[in-house]
Amino acid sequence: MVDLAALPAAEAAKKIRTGEITSVRLVEACLRRIEERDGELHAFVHLDPELALAQARAADKMQEAGEALPPLHGVPVAVKDVIDARGLPCENGSPIFEGRTPSADASCVRQLREAGAIIIGKTVSTELASLTAGPTLNPHNTAHTPGGSSSGSAVAVATGMVPIALGTQTAGSVLRPASYCGVYGFKPTRGLISRSGVLLQSHTLDTVGVMGRSLDDIALAADCMAAQDPSDDVSYPRGRVSLQKLARQARPFPPRLAFCKTPAWAQADPVTQEAFAELVSSLGGNCVELDLPESCKPILEYQSLIQLAENAHYYGPFFEDYPDVLSPGMLDRLKQGMMISARDYLRAEMARDVFYEIFEARYDGFDAVLCPASPGPAPRGIEKTGNPVFNGLWTYLGVPALSIPMFEDNGLPFGLQLVGRRCEDGRLLRTARWLVSHLQGAA
């Protein structure tokens, strides 16, 4: 028998549409998996099984009535607990928001519902989507971190609790947990998916992302949410070209890939450095090593500086009103942010497009940049969420990036990161599809 809880979202949607399975059966399978695993792993902070099943029954009735079915019809999706979903608590990983239950959906959740998705529950976020760890454990080894801040979403997808989950990223909060938990993670071009109704900690960095079990899942979910939203000032106009269709297009010739060690290479684990040496060698002429120029070294510092300064701005009232509720780590971060001068902040902000122009010129003629998605496998210990040093620079530049489950060491997965140009998300997904197929064929 097919393990329904293990189905990728795109395949599950197809089976529901053809009548091979029902939404109720799929949701029941996911709820059983949650019951089996979540007591140990703590991926969910809020779950309403009856509400989820009621949505599934309504979806099945639509199908029985012969109505036109949207692309994610009947497929369960989990939502990180910093993203509003009407009728479900949204507590932002902090006691400050205990009991908060929004009456309206975030734009991305509303679009998922319009696409037919079943919102099954809310996944654990670290405190205020920052670095202080929550209760979630890595399913591959519970003594190791699952990453953060979208820890619950990564674990829920990795264990079959749900085929798709939403996360958010300000530095590495989608890509790093995806790498540590062995799932696909996608941080799109900043502004592709609306942030309206999402906890804001950095208006220049925050990005809504997706985790799934396949590239098809990632593309399908992103397609459903990729609409311009005037209420989000970084949302931009775009054609309604299907990312899923672009990702599935056959390439007439192999892509050109550039291996970039990035300024963080010295912080990569030895196992990661060895894995990428072998990977680049196996790709032969399809991949050349081409690093960012020396002038780009400040990128890591600038991303961190902007995040700290904007955290201090948006979370400053919490520092003043709830100092006894915030964790010591969060208090320290806010103190650091408050000490950043306007001059330093503006220098980091104004350099962003200068660095992007350098990046674009450096990799002109390449289809994607290849680099680690994390320094290595998830580090031991659950007090911290790992280092986002291989992700923050791409978030700073606002470019699309993917974490692809590719490597393993002592039973712990870690990902390959693929990076593209702004607004070329479809091209990036298409390149990723070729790369995965090529490497699987070579195995």
Image (cartoon, rainbow, N blue to C red):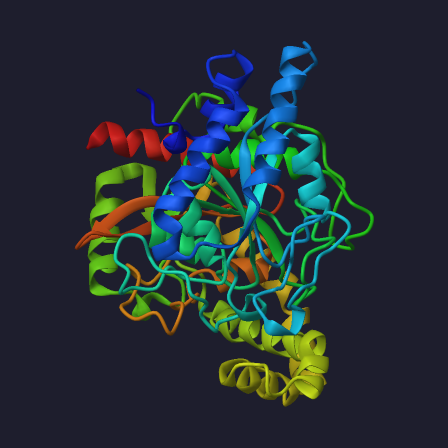
Q: Is residue 296 above or below residue 415?
A: below
* Residue at figure coordinates x 43%, y 30% from the top left: 8
* Residue 333 screen position, x and y as percent: 55, 82
* Residue 317 screen position, x and y as percent: 73, 81
* Residue at figure coordinates x 40%, y 24% from the top left: 253
Q: Is residue 381 above or below residue 330?
A: above
Q: Is residue 96 above or below residue 367?
A: below
Say if residue 289 shows up in the picture. no
Front residue of 81 and 280: 81
Quick one: which residue is furthest to the front in this view? 50
* Residue at figure coordinates x 72%, y 38% from the top left: 227
Say if residue 187 shows up in the picture. yes
Front residue of 29 and 175: 29
Q: Which quarter of the rendering shows the C terminus?
A: top left
* Residue 94 screen position, x and y as percent: 59, 71
Q: Quadrant of residue 340?
A: bottom right
Quick one: which residue is furthest to the right in this view? 230
Front residue of 420 and 13: 13
Horizontal relation, residue 381 to residue 61: left or right: left
* Residue 287 screen position, x and y as percent: 33, 42
* Residue at figure coordinates x 31%, y 53% from the top left: 139
Front residue of 168 and 85: 85
Horizontal relation, residue 354 to residue 284: left or right: right
Q: How many marks?
A: 0
Q: Which quarter of the rendering shows the N terminus?
A: top left
Q: Quadrant of residue 255?
A: top left
Horizontal relation, residue 357 to residue 32: left or right: right
